[in-house]
Image (tube, rainbow, N blue to C red):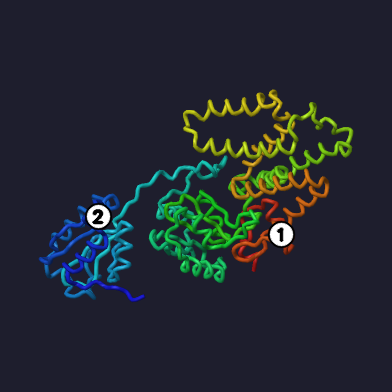
Amino acid sequence: MEKQKISGILQQDMSYLNQVMAVDKNFDVVHRMIHVAEKEACMYFIDGFCKDEVMEKLLEYFFSLTPDKLPQDSQNLNQMDIPYVEVEIEEDWNTILISLMSGMFLLLIEGYQKAVLIDSRTYPARDVSEPDKDKVLRGSKDGFVETLIFNTALIRRRIRSTELRMEMMNAGKSSKTDIVICYMNDRADHKFLEEIRQKINNITVDSLTMNQESLAECLYQRKWFNPFPKFKYTERPDTAAAEVLEGHIVVLVDNSPSAMIMPTTIFDMAEEADDYYFPPITGTYLRLARFLISLLTYLVTPTFLLLVNHPQWIPESFRFIMLKEEANIPIIWQFLILELALDGLRLAAVNTPNMLSTPLSVLAALVLGEFSVNSGWFSSEVMLYMAFVAIANYTQSNYELGYALKFLRILNLILTQLFGLWGYIGGIVLAGVLIASNRTVSHESYIAPLIPFHWGRLKNRLIRRRLPGAVHKSKERK
């Protein structure tokens, strides 16, 4: 596609820009005629993006310019001593329009076939407070926000290395959403990095409406029947910085308060920042406990259903797990109804105003707890195991992994009810096959280093080792 360049005739360039930007209809597109060194000029900017104090200083400088201080031709326009740090000279209209719509200050001068772009923009932003989802008991209390430049600064603050790279790209025909690829030049897999670059460049969607989820679906065409996540998301800059140092690639998307980490295995999904903010023995315990509890959330309800349907298999010492009263509704339907009800409560909690969250939580606990058991709808044992599953799901912060286990748990419940022991075993085997046959976005094994087996790396994944002298995962892969 041939680039369309500035003509250098101010009225002609203004006419084109006014038409493209619909200045007569867009109230927030501000333009004003001024004189720069006795030459006519026009400035454009988006109201609300530019800093008023900076604009005042820039206008003061432009008004004070004399003809001898202005370069004679467009080629030397970059020699203007503009008292600002981020100044660009551009002649391509496509680049100029994207920069202007991003909030940069634009100056057109009569007779010059290049424009002056000054990055004096500022975006509305909230504080970099600790994210609600990725809280830690000890450690940093800052988190990513929706402003991209703030997020890159939070990572830069933690990695003061010349090998750190922050590559800017954009995607979306209409949105032109800014995307930053963050990696360590000496540790990242450059073959995989180039693949990511090519995929982002080849994205043909109109806009990244859902930010990172839209980008994730464009980067990897996942199989619909495999629910396990391909990407790890975090709102913590310390976690993102640690992943970058380990050779992973972190992708930041403008307007999104989280970082997308790739490639990631199922062991990466289960790791959390608390594992490293505590001593090795405590971190190891927390990690193993998280693995065990996640396994129990998948197995506890299908196992109970299997034993209730075949009470002769229950040892005498465990007879207390049997139902105390005859169920009015089949156990399988109780489990399925409660699985749906838990998601209903979760969706209701998201949309509940803060002032009403406490009383509504108490009401929900009474209605779905004691009253539902007394009314005969649910058995107390079923309520107990589903309460454990609901609470235990929050031991790991990855929502996608939690729902993957939920879908497989429901499938196992149905298979167990239909085919008994063979259905129970088949459900477990199916879950294992889905995990083992999955691949990361870099086409590696999803359960590495278990398959292919590597005891040294597997031990590091299960046991929290001392950080000083630790070998980076990127070097281990080599």
Residue at image location 29% in from the left, 59% down from the top: 104
Q: Residue 376 appears in which quarter of the rendering?
A: top right
Q: Nearer the viewer, residue 417 or 44?
A: 417
Residue at image location 24% in from the left, 50% down from the top: 52
216 left or right, relative to 324? left
* Mark 2, residue position: 29
Q: Nearer the viewer, residue 193 or 61?
A: 193
Tell me if residue 438 comes above or below residue 326 in the rendering. Answer: below
Residue at image location 67% in from the left, 44% down from the top: 286
Q: CA distance from mark 1 to mark 2?
A: 54 Å
Q: Position of residue 209 (x, y in %)?
A: 44, 54
Badge 1 element: helix
Tell me if residue 88 comes above or below residue 381 in the rendering. Answer: below
Tell me if residue 412 comes above or below residue 309 in the rendering. Answer: below
Q: Quadrant of the N terminus?
A: bottom left
Query: Amino acid under label 2?
Result: Val
Q: Quadrant of the C terminus?
A: bottom right
Pointer 2 local density, CA inside 10 Å: few below 14, some 14–19, many at least 20: some
Badge 2 element: strand
* Disc assigned to residue 436: 1
Q: Residue 477 appears in which quarter of the rendering?
A: bottom right
124 left or right, relative to 373? left
Q: Residue 321 appears in which quarter of the rendering?
A: top right
